[in-house]
Amino acid sequence: MSVSDAERDAGGRRMLGGLLAASHLMPLELLPGKTAEHARAAGFSEVRIYLGDLQRRVLRLLTGLGPDAGGGADGEDGELAMETSLAGRAYQLGRILPGAPAEPGPGRPAGAEGRQWWVPLLHGAERLGVLRVTTALEDARAEEDMSHLASLVALIVHSKQTSSDSFARLTRSAPMNIAAEMQWHLMPPRSYADGRVVISASMEPAYQVSGDAFDYSTAGDVVHLAIFDAMGHDTAAGLSANLAMATCRNSRRQGAGLVEITERIEAALVEQYGHGRYVTGIQADLDASTGVLSWVNRGHHPPILIRGDGGPTHLSCRPAHPMGTGLGLKVTVCREQLAPGDRIVLYTDGITEARTSGGTEFGLERFTDFILRQHADGLPVPETLRRLTRAVLDHHDGRLQDDATILLCEWLGPRAEPTAQAAGLVGIPGPQTPQHSPP
């Protein structure tokens, strides 16, 4: 190993070790400065952190200044459009992309020369934003160090966001109602992947959602999926959905089966509201070792199965009554054998029933065709759902009359270990996956 290689190895270790040590007692506001400080050890003359807003339409510069930690951003660099910027493309594809050569400018550190690189910020399969890294180094080792730095910054951002109002202010583009505040606090990350499954979800209207909720979890070989749609479009709907979600998780963690979970949810709703509130939903378990999907339907739209080698079909299962109505209908567990590459889609009626001002529905056929086309184009699953949600909103002129939620799960096979296939489906650098693509 040459001296220069040894120095770069030592510099990369100092960068990561120093930032990791600093992170334990560091508020979010100090992260931009500390990241830039420690990144210089690896030859990165400038690093900027951009975080995606809640709807993933823009990327906003984290400066650490002001009540939203985004104050003092200079010019157009403070907010980048997801659809039209190179930063947005790096975010969408989950790839490191080379940008323009660095040019002198206000606020640019002395010696900040070389090329700018856009690096996705990924916490697991969840996309948080991008880094803009400026460096004169242009080789595989530099890209590796950028990727490691981005992974550490994403871990730190994730660890700080639940306790930081600055993070919430920076990543919101509109006031949020109380029900939506409850829902987003309760939701799991919008994307998850391992060697067996890829899961992604979306929920709109992001700032006004009331009664919709989604959930997923893993326990051994079992992957649990759930979607809820509570009666109404008010804060009470949000409370009902929260009660259903909490009861589901509590029951599941005590070993309850699918039928018992829904019965416990119904009992909790009746105890709280009498029969004045109800929640529809699907509870499903995927045995990732065999591909057997089991589910129960409580007054909800049936799941859609999109075969890896064919088109979409509804999964037929006799629905029981909505949870909370106490109608006493039999709850049936239904099963379907999946093949690797099959996708299960759970959704609420705000997706298919979104209408134009002229009354035209978005519709189930358009919904499934969109998923098939984007999948055929090779887009990461989270990006497919981001674009689908935008298409639904555009169809409705940006204003939905009902909550619209999607939960998509693709079964890859029985092995939990990370695979290149899983990495490619969520846009994460993985085994045999190149780090960057041409802009």
Image (cartoon, grey):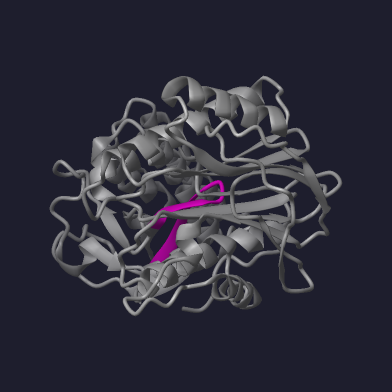
In this rendered view, identify the residue nearer to me: 215 or 179. 179
Residue 27 position by quadrant:
top left
Q: Position of residue 343 (x, y in %)?
A: 70, 60
Q: Please, what is the dominant secondary structure of the magenta stretch?
A: strand
Magenta run includes residue 123: yes
Q: Which residue sits furthest front?
A: 327
The stretch in magenta equals 116-130
In this rendered view, identify the residue nearer to me: 266 or 239. 266
In this rendered view, identify the residue nearer to me: 357 or 22. 357
Residue at (54, 69) in percent of width and height:
436
Residue 409 position by quadrant:
bottom right
Residue 138 in view (yes/no)? no
In this rendered view, identify the residue nearer to me: 181 or 50. 181
* 274 relative to 306, above or below: above
* 283 relative to 324, above or below: below
Q: Position of residue 137 (x, y in %)?
A: 45, 65
- In this rendering, would 126 be left or right of 238? right
* 377 relative to 104, above or below: below
Residue 224 in view (yes/no)? yes
Q: Position of residue 365 (x, y in %)?
A: 59, 75
Q: Position of residue 362 (x, y in %)?
A: 47, 73
